[in-house]
Image (cartoon, coloured by chain):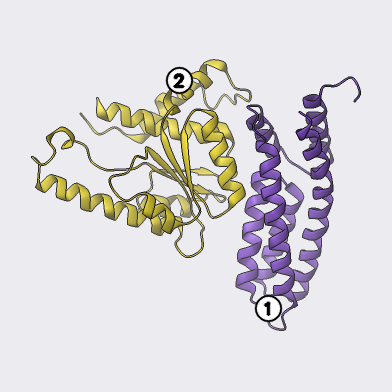
Chain colours: A purple, B yellow
Amino acid sequence: MASMNPKERRDAFADSMIAEGLLDQQFNQLLMLEEDGGGFLVEVIKLFCDDSERMISELSSLIDQPVVDFQKVGSFVHQLKGSSSSIGAHNIMVACMHFRQFCEQNDKQGCFRALNAVKNEYYRLQAKFNILVQLSREC
Amino acid sequence: MKPLRASTVAACFQELLGIGKQQKKEIPNESAFLRGLLIGKNILVVDDNKVNLRIAAAALKKYGAKVECADSGKEALSLLQLPHKFDACFMDVQMPEMDGFEATRQIRLMENKANASMAANPNASAAVSTYEWHLPILAMTADVIQATYEECMKCGMDGYVSKPFDEEMLYKAVAKFLVSKRIHET
């Protein structure tokens, strides 16, 4: 990595995230948009993380209720799935699709497990995004 | 001038741009051509999802379009009170309160009213009397199935793009409508 310029370092790190399966090809679209500069990538990642954390906390409290409002849960999951697919967060998107199915079946235990899967995927991605943001700021 | 079929325009475009031959990388000519179409155009993007909104806006701005965003159907309606400056609109289908279909129905209703009153007073504005309000509205949807497509057409949308859109698809869709509009005007 030492011989690379900052932009190459950032792109190499993004490529490694794609290779790991944390991100899909959609993220390449965002890298292409970043080329004009202006901190777009950092802004979108921040928007995504703020939004995801808000959804996760809403979902956690909804699922803790004695009577779960599955429709409300479903609409938050839909939101999270939308932003995950836009940013290319493949694993979160897949976890959301399973989550959606449990919602439709009014399966509280299933929803609980699905939420944990979403959380795990999110925190795994967030840790890498933090590094990517750092690398982007050096560009 | 004969009504121009969307399929004809699409066919012309496909030929012109070589879509379908699966061009992955941007070709400088194509990019410059589309930039020429989009530059200075006012485009409204409507989506309740902030991440989607930001990405769509960035993709269109890259090609010189002036983009405004609305995060609900209601806000879109208030921005689209006639007369407005927009050349095209991208509309999310699934939104809370007012979905994209309902917002489109209401936009068309406003346009029809304005067109009817223009037809009733042809002398009021002779210069623009041949111009009818019809904002090209493209649905943005994650599930491009036949039922969604039919619903889009039924409520008065002009087409759709699937989500997440890649940049290329997004600007091709807009370019199609801006071109057909230009032909209508000549």
Q: Position of residue B134 (x, y in %)?
A: 30, 43
Task: Pick the quarter of the image with the C terminus of chain B.
Answer: top left
The Cα atoms of the two marked residues, 2 and 1, are separated by 54 Å
Q: Residue at x 55, y 29 (%)?
A: B62
Q: Which amino acid lies under the numbered mark 1 shown in the image of this protein?
A: Val
Q: Position of residue A6 (x, y in %)?
A: 80, 26
Q: Residue at x 66, y 57 (%)?
A: A80
Crowd tier of the residue under label 1, counting other residues whose Cα lies within 10 Å: few below 14, some 14–19, many 20 or above: some
Q: Position of residue B115 (x, y in %)?
A: 20, 47
Q: Nearer the viewer, mark 2 or mark 1?
A: 1
Q: Chain of mark 1?
A: A
Tag 2 residue: B16
Tag 1 residue: A68
Residue furthest toward the bottom?
A: A66
Q: Position of residue B59 (x, y in %)?
A: 56, 35
Task: Pick the quarter of the image with the N terminus of chain B.
Answer: top left
Q: Residue at x 63, y 23 (%)?
A: B25
Name the residue nearer the viewer: A9 or B6.
A9
Q: Residue at x 59, y 51 (%)?
A: B50
Name the residue nearer the viewer: A108 or B123.
B123
Crowd tier of the residue under label 2, counting other residues whose Cα lies within 10 Å: few below 14, some 14–19, many 20 or above: few
